Image (spheres, rainbow, N blue to C red):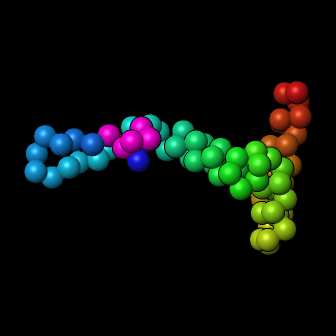
C-alpha cells in the first residue's frame, strides 16, 4: 500500500510507523473503481444489480438508493 501511495511509512526509528496518505473516502473510491473495472468491466450498474440480487435490501436502503439515482439523474 506504500508503493501505491495509500500509506506513508516513517522509517526513522526501529519500528516502522504507517499513516494514511489519503482520506478514507478517497481510498474507498480508488479501491471501488479498481474493483468495478476488474470484476464488472467498468460497469457500476452491473455491480449494483449483482448486489441487489444477492442481498436482502431494506426499504430504507432502497429509498436511499432511489434518492441518489434521482440526484444523479438531475445532474445529467
75 to the left or right of 3: right
Which residue is drawn at the image coordinates 32% and 40% (left, top)? 8
Q: In x, y percent, where is residue 73?
A: 89, 34
Residue 76 in view here = yes
> Viewer-proximal residue, 17 or 23?
17
| Residue at (84% x, 68% y) in the render | 53
Query: Horizontal and vertical percent for residue 14?
Result: 10, 51
**Image location of residue 26, percent across then percent down:** 54, 39
Decide if residue 57 is on the left or right side of residue 14: right
- Whether residue 62 appears in magenta in the rendering, the answer is no
What is the chief secondary structure element of the magenta stretch? loop
Image vertical order of residue 8 relative to residue 41, above or below: above
- The residue shown at (41%, 47%) is 1
Q: Residue at x 83, y 54 (%)?
A: 46
Q: Is there any visible trace of residue 25 in the rendered image?
A: no
Q: Nearer the viewer, residue 52 or 4?
A: 4
Quarter of the image with the C terminus is top right
Q: What range of the chain is rendered magenta?
A: 2-8
Amino acid at each position: 500500500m506504500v508503493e501505491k501511495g495509500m500509506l506513508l511509512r516513517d522509517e526513522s526509528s526501529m519500528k516502522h510507523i504507517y499513516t494514511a496518505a489519503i482520506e478514507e473516502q478517497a481510498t474507498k473510491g480508488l479501491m471501488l473503481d479498481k474493483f468495478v473495472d476488474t470484476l464488472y468491466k467498468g460497469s457500476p450498474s452491473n455491480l449494483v444489480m449483482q448486489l441487489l440480487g444477492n442481498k436482502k435490501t431494506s426499504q430504507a436502503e432502497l429509498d436511499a438508493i432511489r434518492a441518489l439515482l434521482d440526484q444523479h439523474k438531475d445532474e445529467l
